[in-house]
Structure formats: C-alpha cells, structure tokens
C-alpha cells in the first residue's frame, strides 16, 4: 500500500511544475494566487470528511500539535512563494531539481539535532544527488535571471524540508485528514497575507486561469502532497523526501511533452541514479532497525539511530 501511495504521490507532485509554468505563462494568474487557492481548496476538501465523521476531532487538537501544524503551514507557504516564483525565472527541470533537494536539508537539520546517519544513508544521498546533477546538467544559473530562479528554488527546498519535518512530528498523533486540513488552511492564510502585502491579486482571472488552478489543486495538492503527508505516519521524513526526488525526472519529462522544453540529456541516467540512491537509503533504514532490535535483545548496540526515530526527540 505504501508503494502505491508513493507512486501516486510522485505522479501528483511531478505534475506541479509543468502545470504551474503553463498556467503562469498563458494566463493572468499570479504566483501567490496559485499557492492560495490550491491550499484553501485542499483544506476544505480534507476537512469535510473529518467534520462529517468526527466533528469533535478538531476540538481535540493539543497545543503541541497546533504548533507543529503552524510551523508546517508557514514553511509550506514560504516554500510555495519561492518555488512558484522560481518557475517564472528558470526552467522547470532546474527549479524542480533544486526544490527537491529537501532531503539534503533534512539530513542537515537532523545532524544539527545530533542524529548520526548510517553510512548507507550518506552514500544513498550522494548517489541520488548525482542523479539530480545528471538531469539538470549545466542548465542551472545560465543567466542572471535563471540564477535568481535557482536560488529561490534552493530556498524553497530548505523550506520544504522544514515543512516535512514539522509534518512528521504532527503526524505522530494526528490523522491525515485533520493534519492536512489544518496545515493547508494555515498555509492559505499565510499566503493571503503575503499576497496583500505584495499586491498580487487572488481573483479576477479568466476561465483558463481558474482551470489551471483547479488542475494544480487536484493533481499536486490533493493527490501529491496529501499522499506524502499520509506516508509520514509510517516512514521517516528523510525517506519520504528521498522518494520525492523522483519528481525531478517526472517533471522534466512532462515539461518536455507538454511545454516543449528540451528534455535534459541525463534524464534517464539521473532517474536510474535516484532509484539506486533510494534503494541504498532503504537498505540503511532496514539495517538501523535490525540494529535496534539487536540492542533490545541485549546484543551490541548500533552506532546510529534508526531512520524511524529521526525527528522524534
């Protein structure tokens, strides 16, 4: 079941870059309007079943859960502001590749918190990032405008890592519906404030613009983001972020087919490297769990903490 959800999630988020680039390029929709409506609609859709089945669920949210949701929502809002703007300045392939480096940021965050990663995890990250480099090639920073777009996408990846870590904490005790409804709602509110301050309109678009917003909301938000938020209850944030790396070749292929962007020469080699890196990380996770079981049985303790514990201090 987790494999199926991961595949669906990758397909959903891979469509995000091409759909956003197409909508921004062909309509009057603003970048923050896309971020606002995809989260506002997502919050309503995810909250509705919970309100029908368990109307008191939201009243039982603890202060700790609320704080983690708020952190995740604000980080997600800033992530969208950076990423969507970057798509107007650089290519879909480069922007998607850089924003998907959230797994590297998560590893850095965890190192600062004292987590010692197993060697398999570090090797797997290195192999996967080699795949990212193979896909993007020399596309990044090819002009001052593209360089700014790349920097914004890089910042978006850092914020996505923070969003994933905070979501992992919240999902330890919250259902998918409750967490996503609250997180998306907070994100929409934060984006609305940024839109007002930045003078970006949130309405008044042509029919094609609203159709683009709807497509982005359904594919990327309701399918992609929600699938990965569900997986955070059973997978470590680092492993989830590694799976999201598969968005990079997916977005590049979709942009080549539908937006006539040149498909990076290293797309398929990069895909193979990302999959290989992911397999090595999974191996490291299993080794960590096996080591933990050995410790519980009185055997020699492992040198590292298992990935399932990451971010749970």
Image: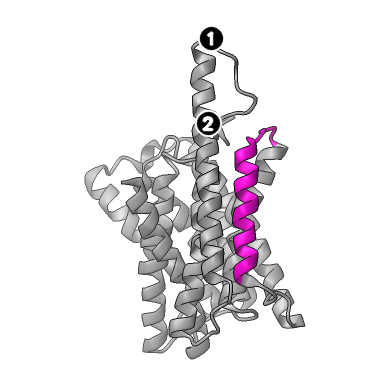
Location of residue 159 (image quadrant) = bottom right
**Element carrying mark 2:** helix
Q: Which of marks 1 and 2 is nearer the N terminus?
A: 2
User: Which residue matches tag 2?
Assistant: 287
Q: Which portion, as a residue range, is magenta?
A: 113-135
Task: Please state if 231 lies on the left or on the right of 55 as rendered.
Answer: right
Q: Nearer the viewer, residue 230 or 140?
A: 140
Residue 98 magenta-drawn?
Answer: no
Query: Going 56% across and 58% down the picture, which residue do you hit?
Result: 273
Compared to 137, does 246 lie above or below? above
Task: Please state if 240 lies on the left or on the right of 174 as rendered.
Answer: right
Q: Which residue is the extreme one toward the right?
A: 144
**Element carrying mark 1:** loop
Location of residue 299 (image quadrant) = top right
Image location (x, y in percent) of residue 275: 50, 55
Compared to 162, does 10 lie above or below? below
User: Which residue matches tag 1?
Assistant: 298
Residue 115 magenta-drawn?
Answer: yes
Q: Which of 203 and 45 is in front in this view?
A: 45
Image location (x, y in percent) of residue 87: 59, 77
Instruction: Quadrant for the C terminus, please.
Output: top right
Let me know if residue 288 appears in the view: yes
Q: Is the magenta stretch mostly helix, strand or loop?
A: helix
């Amino acid at each position: 079941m987790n494999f199926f959800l991961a595949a669906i999630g990758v397909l959903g988020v891979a469509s995000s870059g091409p759909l956003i680039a197409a909508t921004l390029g062909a309509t009057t929709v603003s970048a923050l309007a896309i971020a606002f409506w995809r989260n506002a609609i997502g919050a309503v859709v995810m909250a509705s079943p919970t309100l029908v089945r368990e109307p008191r669920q939201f009243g039982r949210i603890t202060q700790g859960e609320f704080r983690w949701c708020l952190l995740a929502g604000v980080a997600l809002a800033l992530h969208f502001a950076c990423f969507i703007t970057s798509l107007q300045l650089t290519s879909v392939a480069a922007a998607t590749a850089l924003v998907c480096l959230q797994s590297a940021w998560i590893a850095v965050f965890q190192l600062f918190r004292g987590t010692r990663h197993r060697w398999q995890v570090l090797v797997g990250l290195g192999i996967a990032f080699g795949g990212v480099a193979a896909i993007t090639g020399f596309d990044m920073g090819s002009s001052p405008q593209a360089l700014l777009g790349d920097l914004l996408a890089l910042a978006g990846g850092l914020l996505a890592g923070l969003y994933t870590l905070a979501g992992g904490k919240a999902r330890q005790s919250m259902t998918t519906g409750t967490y996503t409804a609250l997180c998306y709602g907070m994100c929409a509110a934060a984006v609305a404030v940024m839109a007002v301050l930045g003078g970006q309109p949130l309405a008044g678009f042509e029919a094609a613009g609203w159709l683009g917003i709807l497509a982005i909301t359904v594919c990327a938000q309701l399918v992609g983001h929600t699938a990965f938020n569900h997986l955070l209850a059973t997978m470590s944030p680092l492993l989830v972020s590694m799976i999201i790396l598969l968005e990079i070749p997916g977005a590049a292929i979709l942009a080549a087919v539908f937006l006539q962007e040149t498909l990076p020469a290293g797309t398929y080699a990069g895909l193979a490297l990302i999959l290989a890196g992911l397999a090595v990380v999974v191996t490291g996770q299993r080794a960590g769990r096996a080591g933990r079981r050995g410790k519980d049985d009185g055997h020699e303790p492992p040198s590292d903490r298992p990935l399932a514990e990451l971010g749970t201090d």
